[in-house]
Each structure stands twice: as C-alpha cells, then as structure tokens.
Image (cartoon, grey):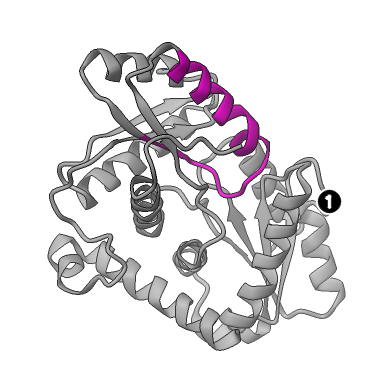
Amino acid sequence: MHHATRHATRHATQLAARLAAGPAATTAGNAAGTQARPAAGPALVVVAHGSRDPRHSATVAALCARLRALRPGLRVEAAHLEFNTPSVPRLLERLHAEGVRDVVALPLLLSRAFHAKSDIPAVLHEATSRLPRLRVRQAEVLGPHPLLVGALERRLREAGLTADRHRSTGVVLASAGSSDPEAIAVIAQTAREWRRAGGWCAVRPAFASASLPRTEDAVRGLRADGVEHVAVAPYVIAPGYLPDRIRNGALQERADVLAPVLGSAPELASLMALRYDEAAARGPLALSA
C-alpha cells in the first residue's frame, strides 16, 4: 500500500511537471490521458461555491483558463452556487438556448460534503426538470487524489520548503472544515497517507471552521511534540474568509513555512480534466445523491 501511494505521488509530480512545461511536453508522455488535444463531447460546467471575495472568482477563472489550454476544443464554463454570476440555473438555461444538449457538471470541491451531496444535485435536478432536452452528469469532487498532494507539495516548495527538510518538518494540512463526518475522515486519511508517502516528520489535519483543531492549535501541538520545523499547507482552492483564518493562525503561532492556497496549480487542472473524462464516460444522466 505504501509503495502504491508513493508511486501515485511520483506519477502526480511527473504529470504536473509536464503540464507546467506546456502542451508539447504534455502530449509527449502523459499516460493519464489528460494531455492537450482537440476535445469533443459534453460541455464542462465548473460549479464553484462562490464568494464575496473577488479573489475567489479570479481563481475560478484562472483554473478554467488553464483547463481550456489543457483541452483545446472543450467548452469550459463556470457557474456558482451563490454570491457570483452566472448562477448554475442561469448558465444551464443559456447553454440550452444555444443548443447544448450534453453537460458535465464538475463540483470545484475537494471533498464530498453537504454541497456535493445535496446542494449541487438539487440545483442540477431542478434545472434539468425545466430543460428536459439537457443531459447533465455530475462529476465526482476533486479529492482525494494524489494530484492534490502534488499541488500541496508544489505550493510548499514555492514557499521555500526544500526536500532535504521533509524528515524534520511537521505539516499542518489546513482545510476549510466541515460538519460532515465523511469529509473529516477523508482529510484525516489524506494526512496519514501524505506523511508516509512524503517522508514528513508528521502531518496533522486542522480546520478553519466546524471542526477542531484550528490551524494555530495544530502548530502548537507540533511544537510541543518537539518537531523542528512546522509548515502550514492550506488544503483550499481559492483565497477567502476561511483561508485567511488559516493564514492568521499560522502567522499567530509563527509557523516556519506558510504555503499559498492551491489556486490554479497545474495539478488541479489535470485533475479537473480527469474527473470530466470519468463523468463523460458514464451514462446519459447521473446526478450524485
């Protein structure tokens, strides 16, 4: 199991490197099937939560742009559950009016919590009940997946953490938080697997809301356990209120390294393409429940 996890992590890192190098390098050797190529098939609607913070919508736009570059010919649109426009129903109505009849709806979420299990299926079901000629397949959420670990490690490297310090570094895997037990369990499992695969001294989960511990508590706990270096890796896609809470907790306890959010990392675009492919290969109408 440990060998398989390490192999998957190495593959994710190699894949991300090819994505960052550009379409030619990606096309040359991408065994995951996410290489740049003309695309035909359903339109892709990226379903983001939405935020009053303009950094959120800017991040969604940047991710969609990276995905379009990765998949020339694939129609990629973004919609939001709240705060931003277009809303999911309005975008689906526009696509339908333009003659689009097949859509993959991809939740821009890292875990299967309330939004993925309830909100998004309900919105999609309501829209398709009014647009009977529109077929919609809901893709799986992004996590867990080794490509997300690759993105986390990319951000830590960008923040100055070098590979030779892995064994002396404890990482706080800081997520937004959820009241959903499944989502919390997945974060904890991700932390355990990342510690083994990444060779870290420790990886501890933390949450900006709904669950404990908070980021500052996890940093203090690692210090109390004698960990030499402490790094905070935000397991969130876009900046906003909860990511700012993660950042403030890390600064409060003087973490040695604070990584930026995942943002438009190439690993995320690759993973979005993978989730699209999985959903597009399924039957005509599949809305997650």
Q: Is residue 50 left or right of residue 29?
A: right
The residue located at (27%, 72%) in the rendering is 31
The one nearer the camera, 251 or 88, is 88
The residue located at (21%, 49%) in the rendering is 71
- Disc 1, SS: loop
Residue extent of the magenta highlight: 104-129
The residue located at (15%, 54%) in the rendering is 37
The one nearer the camera, 146 or 210, is 146
> Hey, what amino acid is under mark 1?
Leu
The 10 Å Cα crowd at callout 1, few under 14, some 14 to 19, many 20 or more, is some
Quadrant where the image shows the N terminus? bottom right
Q: Main secondary structure of the magenta part?
A: helix
Snapshot quadrant of residue 215: bottom right
Q: Position of residue 110 (x, y in %)?
A: 56, 49
Q: Is residue 113 magenta?
A: yes
Numbered disc total: 1
Q: Is residue 5 above or below residue 94?
A: below
Q: Is residue 220 left or right of residue 268?
A: right
The residue located at (76%, 44%) in the rendering is 180
Q: Is residue 24 above or below residue 280?
A: below
Q: Is residue 73 above or below residue 207?
A: above
The one nearer the camera, 201 or 145, is 145
Quadrant where the image shows the C terminus? top right
Residue highlighted by disc 1: 212
Q: Is residue 145 left or right of residue 40?
A: right
Q: Position of residue 93 (x, y in %)?
A: 35, 14
The one nearer the camera, 127 or 212, is 127
Q: Position of residue 106 (x, y in %)?
A: 43, 40
